[in-house]
Amino acid sequence: MNNPADLLLFVWQEACRHVHIQESIFAIGDTLVQRMSLDGVLICSLDLEKATAETLAGAFRDEHTKPGDLSKSEIIQPHIEKLKEWLQSGEIVHIKPEAEPAPYIKYLIPQELNGNLLLAPLYTDHSPHGVLIIYTNEKRPLLFEHKNTLKDLIQPITTALNNHQRLEEIEKLKEAAEADLNSLFSRLGRSEIGDVVIGANKGLKHVMERVRLVSNSDMPVLILGETGAGKEVVARAIHQQSPRTDAPFIRVNCGAIPGELIDSELFGHERGSFTGATETRKGWFERADGGTLFLDEVGELPHAAQVRLLRVLQDGTFERVGGGNPLHVDVRIVAATHRNLPEMVSEKSFREDLWYRIAVFPVDLPPLRDRREDIPDLARHFALKATQLFGVPLKAISGHGMSLLLNYDWPGNVRELSTVIERATILSKGLELDIETALGIQPKSRKPFNNETHYSEPDSFPSLDHAMKMHIEKALQISKGRVEGPFGAAELLDINPHTLRGRMRKLEIHWQEYRPDN
């Protein structure tokens, strides 16, 4: 590699081949040391905002020629402007043995580095990156050819250092983003980006089977269920189990967008298309390109928007408001509603052809009152989430509190349960959640027993055994046949499980009859 052109080509190849500057300089520096009879090559990185210089990488003839101090050094503030001027000039500085370098150069050189030095500024696009230093010992001079070769090396070495610095910036941004994400997860009571589907193996088992069936296809899905039942969680599960999982998932609440803005929100608009349109804006369809668009409360869409939605579903094309060029997107549609769409179709308030398009694969999401077996798991999940959200100690849910949750009708479904647990977390002063107060249940005043009120005839008065049997059977219904353990009948009745089993044998109560699979 005696030809200068071959040397320069080699340096460019190594500078572009490696991401980290240490790898580039190890290969380049070793060749330069041998080719130019040097004792060492150093790369110094500059941060003029912090007024620091740091030796990033180097290559040396042997350990005896390696300087001992390669740590970060501080540049004295008064020398910053002079240093900038030198960097911008591109001038190569030659420092001979025992010569005192200029003050603005002094802080760039490792303290134990002596001999003949050549320093070349690495500077591009009005931005200082660093300094390339080559050196020999006192007995071996630096010749004119060294300076000429160094000039040719400035550009490839600057490129390598620039790439290295940008990679460091990206890694710092990534670390900051991960820290922010972990902080957000901590506040939300989650440990991963995917939504937790509580009840996937219990009350939502049938729903999740439907999700698994449809996830790998691109067909539209319509999720039907009451408000607050968890339709968005199911929609995200479809997206996360699909090949589009790394692409955007965008939720649009169709009922929350004013009618005059619905086209602009869904399809975007061109600059100047209406008053206030000061710039071109992408709509939700463009932003979801390649991913999934979740149209929540799709039954609230006005008739005109239904026509344009139908066109997108048919051929994937649309036009921005004020635009004349058709745009094409690849978007998977998941819609949801609590409305009775077939009834709306018959009333002509929802297009029949759009109904057929979005209802290719319907998923019925049961209300919480129809999957009470999920309430204990949901309650514990929301209790942990509220604990982390409010920064308070985790509080337990008593047997009585769980009994109240299991017997409540939940008109607001899962969303209401979450709100109740959060409210109980705030209201509770002891070690247990105050479910009774959070549900708004007023303590009942005790009234004296009145035979006339409860039993008009002596014949209708039940025996003690019969009353006890009905009470135990009710507890077994709530606990789904579970006798002991968390949320078992014994816990609900506040009785020892062995005592309860003894009374069940005496009263001929069989727990197996209350199991869901029986």
Image (cartoon, rainbow, N blue to C red):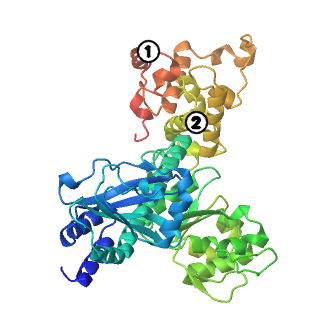
Q: Percent from the top left, x then y, of residue 118?
A: 34, 66
Gap between marks 1 and 2 measured at Cα: 32 Å
Q: Identify which residue is drawn at 44% across, 40% down.
A: 516
Q: Percent from the top left, x then y, of residue 112?
A: 30, 49
Looking at this view, is 1 or 187 the one in front? Answer: 1
Q: Which mark is residue 386?
A: 2
Secondary structure beneath dot 2 equals helix
Q: Is residue 307 left or right of residue 386?
A: right
Q: Identify which residue is drawn at 49% across, 47% down.
A: 179
Q: Percent from the top left, x then y, of residue 202?
A: 44, 45
Tell which circle, 1 or 2, labels the residue nearer the N-terminal end.
Answer: 2
Q: Is residue 9 left or right of residue 281?
A: left
Q: Quadrant of residue 158?
A: bottom left
Q: Which mark is residue 496?
A: 1
Q: Quadrant of residue 171?
A: bottom left
The relative height of residue 488 versus residue 369 in the rendered view (above or below) is above
